Amino acid sequence: MSVYIAGEMPSGSVDCIVTSPPPHLVAYLAGAIDSDGTIGVRRLTYHMRVRGDARQPTYSERVMLKQVTPQIPELLKSTFGGSLTMQPPTATRGRLLYCWEATNRVAAAAFSAMIPYLTVKREQALNALALRASKDRPRSETHSYRDAAETRARWGQTMIRRLEVSAATIAERESIYQRALELNRVGIDVEETAL
């Protein structure tokens, strides 16, 4: 039986750790995500609100894990990629937190590998993978043209056609985002306390 150490290839292995991590390692990391991680969908409206150079929000899959010790976040980064940062504590007398985060395709690859082992956060991962499926469809299915006026310095105003994400696709992605909010909601419902 070989022992896997983060950052090293198992002896005699010809597989790439990034594309095919050992199943026991993926199961272990899925357990860490189930207990200390968060899986969701992020809606970014900064380009609409602040910069004013976009007409639609963008959506991305996201997975994050924060712990006070670096071992698991570093193992997640070495296995799936993503970013590793240190964040200030949330508690008054807390310790610095090691934070691993992956978004978009990196997060989707991590979800796909961990799905068989996730129990608590399985629905969140499946919802985020639905967003990835929507984003991976061809542009001919997800985009449409709109007529826009563009001002050019020499020639004045001309009409051009711009390709943008269709309203139906935005509605689909917004429903996935709302489902992610519902799945990650915290607190106690009044109806649940009556039982």
Image (tube, rainbow, N blue to C red):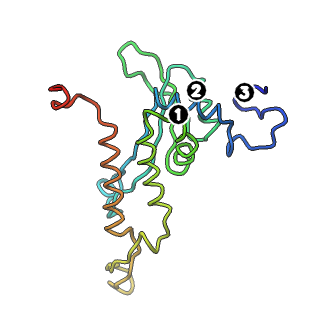
Q: Which residue is mark 3?
A: 5
What residue do we see at 29% from left, 36% from top?
A: 185
> Which image quarter holds the N terminus?
top right
Tell me which numbered mark, 1 or 2, is placed earlier along the sequence: 2
The amino acid at mark 1 is Trp
> Is residue 193 found left or right of 27 in the rendered image?
left
x, y percent for residue 80: 61, 40
Tell me which numbered mark, 3 or 2, is placed earlier along the sequence: 3
Question: Quadrant of residue 72 in the image?
Answer: top right
Tell me which numbered mark, 1 or 3, is placed earlier along the sequence: 3
Q: Which residue is mark 2?
A: 72
x, y percent for residue 186: 29, 31
User: Mark 1 against mark 3, which lies toward the viewer?
Assistant: 3
Question: Quadrant of residue 123 in the image?
Answer: top left
Question: Quadrant of residue 159 in the image?
Answer: bottom left
The secondary structure type at the circle numbered 3 is: loop
The amino acid at mark 3 is Ile
Q: Which residue is mark 1?
A: 100
In three-dimensional space, the C-alpha distance between marks 3 and 2, rounded to whole angstroms, equals 12 Å
x, y percent for residue 79: 64, 37
The secondary structure type at the circle numbered 2 is: helix
Classed neighbour count for the residue bearing mark 3: other residues with Cα under 10 Å, few (<14), some (14–19), many (≥20): few
In three-dimensional space, the C-alpha distance between marks 1 and 2, rounded to whole angstroms, equals 9 Å
The amino acid at mark 2 is Ile
Please report contact status of discs 1 and 2: CB closer than 8 Å, yes or no: yes
In the rendered image, the vertical position of residue 160 relative to residue 72, given as above or below = below
In this rendered view, identify the residue nearer to me: 151 or 133: 133
> Is residue 148 found left or right of 11 in the rendered image?
left
